Image (cartoon, coloured by chain):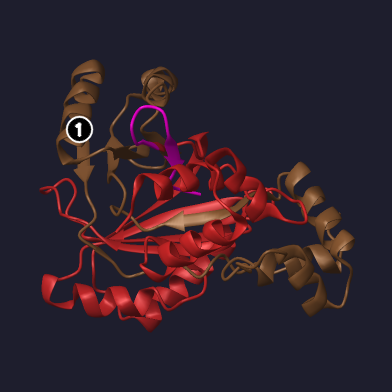
Amino acid sequence: MIDDLDRQLLAIFQKGLPIVSRPYAEIGEPLNLSEDEVINRLSKLKQQGLITRLGVIVNHRKLGYQSNAMVVFNVPDSLVDQIGEHVSQFKFVNLCYQRPRRGERWPYNLYCMIHGKNRDKVLQQLECLIASCGLIKFEREILFSRQCFKQRGALYNLDSKQKVLIHG
Amino acid sequence: MLNGLHKQLLNNYQQDFPLSPTPYKDIAESLGVTEEDVLFAFQQLNDQQFISRIGAVISPNKMGCSALMAMAAPTEQLQQVASLINTYPQVNHNYERENYFNLWFVLIAEDAEDLQTLISELKLRTGLETLYLPLLANYFINLGFELDFDD
């Protein structure tokens, strides 16, 4: 499904596609892969769903989206899939996951992320989400971000030589 | 500042970036500008860090094994704990958030066993109350980040 060359190619690709006329030829060079092979391999990884999105990865903080809130809800298990799918339809929602509850202190099972230009805007969008998805009756917490200690850099260690950047 | 071309490049090419020998030329043709214009504009976006890169977003848990983690760090220890956590290359997206659980980060390990070893080590080294929150279901289809340039 995914071989060593795919991994090595991804490791190089994740440093950023070069901004030159024939970028795929350039990233293939260190691996002795032709331009066509690079394109075919990346297309295959996309078709297989390992690559969920291929393109420009924006820096939303730098673009004015300074505020982000992780909002967690305690939703009945029987409704979580349905609500999760509904929540993820809103264009201001950037992530939407189900995760396990952790006792009384942390009873939440549905997580979503909302990015906005400021705190009020995020709260306004959240209000809209709560009303539209019928979330008012469920326990929730809003966790605005304060400091960012690390924004990227998680590298999946493949064979201690090749590393692939997984997250944006 | 951002011009019209920058905005188009930012909003229209977050998914399905051309997988062709000359992607920038293809973009230029569809926007009615030259390849040089597109290369220059992307270089500016890159130099000014409006983009992190042109690259791929990889499906969670398809390569490696990841989990969201939360820790409850006393305020006076927060910086120190965050720095300690950051020394691990398996850590990313390490944020302070407004909550009793105030430190939130994602771990990506090679496999499930490595992940558990890493979690035990972090718990031991910090001695803090920790939540391990693996993904159960992903409802979100990542189509990129819609930018609103109006205000």
Q: Position of residue A85 (x, y in %)?
A: 31, 77
- In the picture shown, does residue A85 fall above or below B78? below
First to last magenta residue range: A156-168
In magenta stretch: residue A64: no
Q: Position of residue B91 (x, y in %)?
A: 38, 33
Name the image quarter holding the N terminus of chain A: bottom left
Can you tell which quarter of the image residue A24 is in?
bottom right
Residue type at numbered disc 1: Asp
For chain B, give the colour: brown
In magenta stretch: residue A165: yes
Total label count? 1
Q: Residue at x 30, y 81 (%)?
A: A134
Q: Which residue is mark 1?
A: B114
Q: Residue at x 47, y 56 (%)?
A: B57
Q: Main secondary structure of the magenta part?
A: loop
Q: Nearer the viewer, residue A135 or B139?
A: B139
Can you tell which quarter of the image residue B8 is in?
bottom right
Chain corresponding to red in the figure: A
Q: Position of residue B49 (x, y in %)?
A: 71, 44
Residue B151 placement, left or right of A5: right
Can you tell which quarter of the image residue A161 is in?
top left
- In the picture shown, does residue B84 fall above or below A165? above
Chain letter of disc 1?
B
Q: Nearer the viewer, residue B7 or A164?
A: A164
Q: Residue at x 82, y 62 (%)?
A: B38
Question: In this rendering, does residue A23 appear at all?
Answer: yes
Secondary-structure class at tag 1:
helix
Circle 1: is it few (<14), some (14-19), or many (20+) Cα within 10 Å? some
